[in-house]
Amino acid sequence: NRHWYMEPGGKNTKNCVKRADELTATFVWGDHMESTLVRGSPFVTVKYHKAPAAAVGTTQGIRTFYLDDSEISDPPADGAEYTGHKFSAVLRDSDEHWAAYIPPKTTVTIFASPSTFIMRFKAGFSGYVRLALLNNCTTGKRQCLAP
């Protein structure tokens, strides 16, 4: 499973298309989240505005977790607070390396179990979050497919 989610949390988070063309679509989720998706882009950027329970996560466990390029051993499944700018993870099942870039000195709670990875922001979070694919064949644990 290679699916990530980015959500504002709270009630009334239905999304709608604000504008679209052949290569892009801009979505809004209530008053709390907006993102423009671009075909073929290796990243997605989301603008949160006073999000009640903003979160970024995946239904894969992690093999390795980094905070501002320093490895963090065994982040807890029941959550721990970390402050930084770049949070990255090598996923257990797909062997992909992803990074989430958040405003500097932002504190988030990280939940890391064998089957999930979640970054949760404090209530009322406003700012930009970029989720980027850094490498989809990082350790050779999974076979890379040639294009």
Image (cartoon, helix red, strand yellow):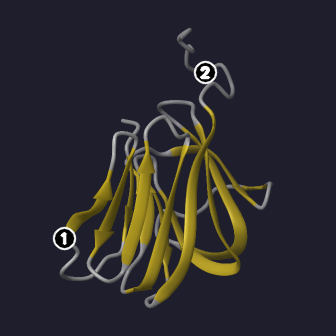
Q: Which residue lies furthest to the top in this view?
A: 146
Q: Judge from the rendering whether residue 132 lies leftward or rightward of residue 38; answer left or right.
A: right
Q: Could you tell me which residue is drawn at 59 percent across and 29 percent down? A: 136
**Mark in front: 2 vs 1:** 1
Q: How crowded is mark 1: few (under 14 residues within 10 Å), some or many (20 or more)?
A: few
Q: Judge from the rendering whether residue 13 lies leftward or rightward of residue 59; answer left or right.
A: left
First in residue order: circle 2 vs circle 1: 1
Question: Residue 55's spot in the image, x, y percent?
Answer: 43, 69
What secondary structure is found at the residue carrying circle 2?
loop
The amino acid type, in three-letter code, at marker 2 is: Lys
- Identify the mark at residue 141; answer none if there is no mark: 2
Query: Closer to the camera, 90 or 38?
Result: 38
Q: How many labels does the image show?
A: 2
**In which quadrant of the rendered image does the N terminus lie?**
top left
Q: Could you tell me which residue is drawn at 56 percent across and 79 percent down? A: 127
Q: Alpha carbon of mark 2 to alpha carbon of mark 1: how far?
A: 38 Å
Query: Closer to the camera, 74 or 119?
Result: 119
Question: Residue 15's spot in the image, x, y percent?
Answer: 22, 66
Q: Could you tell me which residue is drawn at 66 percent across and 80 percent down? A: 106
- Identify the mark at residue 52; answer none if there is no mark: none
Quarter-of-image position of residue 130: bottom right
Question: Residue 144's spot in the image, x, y percent?
Answer: 57, 15
What secondary structure is found at the residue carrying circle 1?
loop
- Identify the mark at residue 14; answer none if there is no mark: 1
Q: Could you tell me which residue is drawn at 21 percent across and 65 percent down? A: 16
Q: Residue furthest right?
A: 70
The amino acid type, in three-letter code, at marker 1 is: Lys
Question: Residue 101's spot in the image, x, y percent?
Answer: 65, 62
Q: Judge from the rendering whether residue 103 lies leftward or rightward of residue 78; answer left or right.
A: right
Q: Judge from the rendering whether residue 18 lies leftward or rightward of residue 40; answer left or right.
A: left
